[in-house]
Amino acid sequence: MRFLANMGISPRTVKWLRSQGHDAIRLVEKGWQFLTDEEIVIKARQEERIILTRDFGIDSLIVMSGELSPSIILLRLNDERPEKVNQILAEVLPQFANELELGAIITVSETVIRVRKLPI
């Protein structure tokens, strides 16, 4: 899978994603750290990347657009240590790979995983 990690995602999580065979980049690696949420969505759509974020605003933009992409994994975790995030992603990614490929917003907390297929 191809990921675009928003600023709140640890470089250690991006490194872990790469170690698992994924194509993952952080906004700062591309010089995109000052992009608006709208511009992040456009970049992810152009590059066919799944947005990995803790920012609620981005999912609203995709819902309002009516588009099938980009997919988003929205992390709503109390424990945001990279080790915990990586552990959760190790469970979520294989379980919901098909949904992410087809277009989905997946919201993940410690107790619940919510999947909304796009368009909404």
Image (cartoon, rainbow, N blue to C red):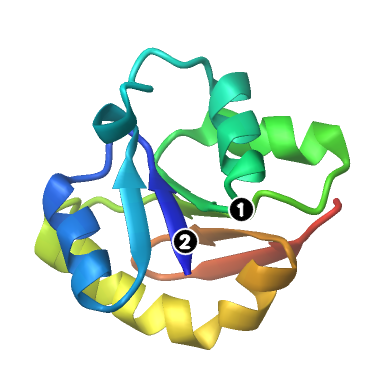
Q: 27 or 75, which is in the foreground?
A: 27
At horizontal 72% and vertical 62% (from top left) the residue drawn is 103
Instruction: Say whether residue 108 is left or right of residue 29.
Output: right
At horizontal 52% and vertical 34% (from top left) the residue drawn is 56
Amino acid, disc 2:
Arg
Residue 42 appears at what percent x and percent y?
65, 31
Q: Quadrant of residue 27?
A: top left
Residue 11 against residue 2 in the figure, above or below: above
Q: Residue furthest bottom?
A: 95
Amino acid, disc 1:
Glu
Residue 29 against residue 109 in the figure, above or below: above
Q: 63 or 19, which is in the foreground?
A: 19
At horizontal 39% and vertical 50% (from top left) the residue drawn is 76
Instruction: Say whether residue 28 is left or right of residue 52.
Output: left
Res. 2 mark: 2
**Residue 75 visible in image:** no
Res. 48 mark: 1
Res. 9 mark: none
Residue 89 appears at what percent x and percent y?
34, 71
Instruction: Say whether residue 1 is left or right of residue 5.
Output: right
Instruction: Say whether residue 10 is left or right of residue 44.
Output: left
Residue 110 appears at what percent x and percent y?
34, 66
**Residue 97 visible in image:** yes
Q: 16 or 61, which is in the foreground?
A: 16
Q: Quadrant of residue 43?
A: top right
Name the secondary structure under disc 1: loop
